[in-house]
Amino acid sequence: MLRLALAFLLAPVAAAAATCRDTSFDGASYTLCEVTLADDLRLFHSGADGAYGSFRAVNQALEGQGQTLGFAMNAGMYHRDLDPVGLYVEEGQETSRLVTRDGPGNFGLLPNGVFCWGEGFRVIESRAFKAEAPACRFATQSGPMLVIKGELHPRFLATSDSLYVRNGVGVSADGGRAVFAISNDAVNFHSFARLFRDELGLSDALYFDGNISRLYAPELGRHDAGFPMGPIVGTVVPKG
């Protein structure tokens, strides 16, 4: 497995708190959580007893270190055993390989992409990621891409009747912030992608999942429950 243990990527990040808020766009309700490089944003998948599967299990693991989640959401698709579908990198260690072929389902609806962060936040189309091989402290692959360099995914239709609760992430052009979004109403891909491009002004955005999408945002009194999850993304803050 590729080991991306560059010293600058593994340096500790100062703790801060993501800001979450409710908003509306194109007739649908959304919750947004914005993260900057001052936040301690991490991916979580497994502990000593196997896959965490829930926000509660991640919080239990952090509790022994005097920490807790500031916010969190599911962060990519996964197999029945909760293993990630596609690339997964945690603290510079790759545990699941990049997938660049097309295939069934939303993940295989190319172009798909990778959410990667180290010195900055990036959303990169998967084949471009393979060619560039950027160093990532954390990375999760999912699909499809929602917005690619300011353009919506070419397969999205404004009139599509495929409506689900959906979640994903977009990044700013300078790599300084990432905005996570979850719809509180069922929406199609076209409308969800336009949220990132037209409302939030983000030129690259990636879909995480739909239907099972869940959010942990204690500042909003929100802790969504449901089936066990695979990869989880969230900020870590001191436990008060």
Image (cartoon, grey):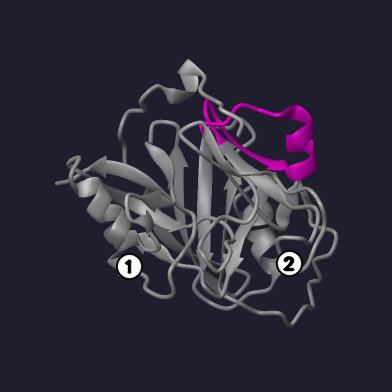
The structure residue drawn at horizontal position 37% and vertical position 45%, both measured from the top left corner, is 235
Magenta-highlighted residues = 117-137
The Cα–Cα distance between marks 2 and 1, rounded to whole angstroms, is 27 Å
> What kind of residue is marked 1?
His
- The circle drawn on residue 104 is none
> What kind of residue is marked 2?
His
In front: mark 2 or mark 1?
Answer: 1
Please determine whether, in this image, residue 57 is positioned above or below residue 236. Answer: below
User: Is residue 197 a member of the stretch shown in magenta?
Assistant: no
- The circle drawn on residue 223 is 1
Who is closer to the viewer here, 223 or 135?
135
99 left or right of 30? right
Q: Secondary structure at mark 2?
A: helix
On the image, numbered disc 2 is attached to which residue?
190
Q: Residue furthest left?
A: 240
Q: Secondary structure at mark 1?
A: strand
Packing grade of label 1 (10 A; few <14, some 14-19, many >=20) is some
Q: Can residue 149 be seen from the camera position used here?
A: no
Q: Residue 122, how many percent across, how many down?
A: 62, 37
Q: Residue 20, how many percent across, how many down?
A: 39, 54
Q: Residue 228, how many percent across, how many down?
A: 43, 69
Q: Quadrant of residue 39?
A: top left
The structure residue drawn at horizontal position 27% and vertical position 66%, both measured from the top left corner, is 221
Who is closer to the viewer here, 234 or 25?
234
238 left or right of 155? left
- Number of on-image labels: 2
Could you tell me if the residues under marks 2 and 1 are in contact, i.e. CB atoms within 8 Å? no
